Image (tube, grey):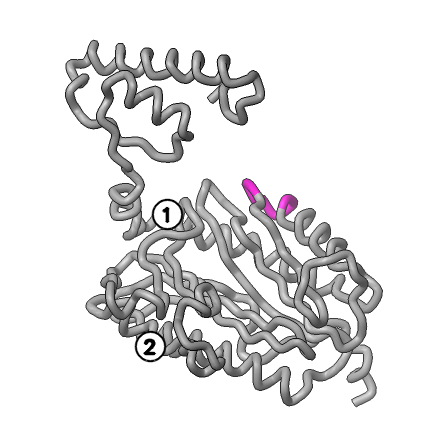
Amino acid sequence: TKWRGYAGGQEVTWALAKKFAADIKSTLKEKGLEKERLGIDGFDEPAREALREAGIALVEVMPAMLEARAVKTKDEINCLKMASAIVDVAWQAVYECMKPGIRDREIEAVAHEALLHAGAESIGFVPVTSGAPARSTDKRVQVGDVVTIDFVGITYMGYTTCYYRSFVVGRKPTTKERDMHKKCYERIYKVIDAIRPGATTADAAKHFAPASSYGHPSEEYMVGHDLGHGLGLSMYEYPVIERLYSFQYPQPFEKGMVVAIEAQEDDPNVGLIKLEEMVVVGETGTEVYTRMPIEDIMIASPILTAAE
């Protein structure tokens, strides 16, 4: 990996890559495997090119790895639940700090500190958006802002999270905000109800919002808007629930799979409302293991409702 980034110059890069390939070829020859295909994942172009020049047949191994990792063991599921429990500690911290005047990035800093104290192994990122339009900036949160937070890639023993919630700061939510939140919640739980062994991602994807409902001519315009994705050592594993291709290329649900299901509504006058649940596929249905309340949009620092 010393050549990565080409920082030493092209000559150094290719010299080191060729040495790397020669060492691998020598090891394969020692073991009588020089004529076999070599499975690789994540190698950069200098490594791949040097291996090919050395006469080594390459094959991308990640599809096979994803198949092997699709169904989790009991220990893996416990690690995923622990990662989620660590995030729950951070949810409490950000909920308490989410007051008018705090900056988006200060909320993120509070989240990072809470995660580390709670035992997070690594932190991917914690995007915080407040107000409209929905952008992660250094702006100060104001009374009435919608704040949306995602805990992405928070790991325990390598196993990760993807966990969205939205809040209103300082006042009761408007009818519009409640409606946006309700749409997300209902879509997520219709998908969850469709997940069981024997069903497929096509059965679940039909409950996500179609592109036509937002005035778009194709599902390509809605990629990532509503999504279900397997979780494990990676953020995106099998199965994936997506209207763009799940109907044509469905994947079966199996006991032991772990899936994150997310849905969003975005309005230029409100901001972004996005929710997400993480579930384990069981014998006949699912177990939701995310614990932060989701049924109704939560009010943070309810200063304008205190007298009611």
Above or below 15: residue 112? below
Would you say residue 208 is visible in this rendering?
A: yes
Pinpoint residue 95: horizontal percent, then vertical percent. Answer: 69, 65
Badge 1 or badge 2: first in the primary sequence: 1
Pinpoint residue 303: horizontal percent, then vertical percent. Answer: 81, 78
87 left or right, relative to 304: left
Q: Which mark is residue 227?
A: none
**From the image, which quarter does the C terminus lie in?**
bottom right
Pinpoint residue 103: horizontal percent, then vertical percent. Answer: 79, 59
Pinpoint residue 166: horizontal percent, then vertical percent. Answer: 62, 70
Disc 1 to disc 2, C-alpha distance: 29 Å
Residue visible at 56% across and 41% down in the picture: 122
Above or below 41: residue 63? below
The three-letter code of the residue at mark 1 reads Glu
163 left or right, relative to 114: left
Residue visible at 20% across and 68% down in the picture: 198
30 left or right, relative to 244: left
Residue visible at 24% across and 21% down in the picture: 56
- In the figure, residue 50 lies in which quadrant? top left
Query: Which residues are the magenta region?
Result: 116-122
| Nearer to us in this view, 256 or 166 | 166
The three-letter code of the residue at mark 2 reads Lys
User: Which of the two discs, 1 and 2, sits closer to the camera?
Assistant: 2
Q: Which mark is residue 76?
A: 1
Q: Residues within 10 Å of mark 1 (few under 14, many from 20)?
A: some
Q: Which residue is mark 2?
A: 206
- In the figure, residue 36 lies in which quadrant? top left
Residue contact at pointers 1 and 2, CB within 8 angstroms: no
Residue visible at 31% across and 58% down in the picture: 239
Q: Residues within 10 Å of mark 2 (few under 14, many from 20)?
A: some
Q: Please tell me whether mark 2 sits on a helix, a strand or a loop.
A: loop
Is residue 115 a member of the stretch shown in magenta? no
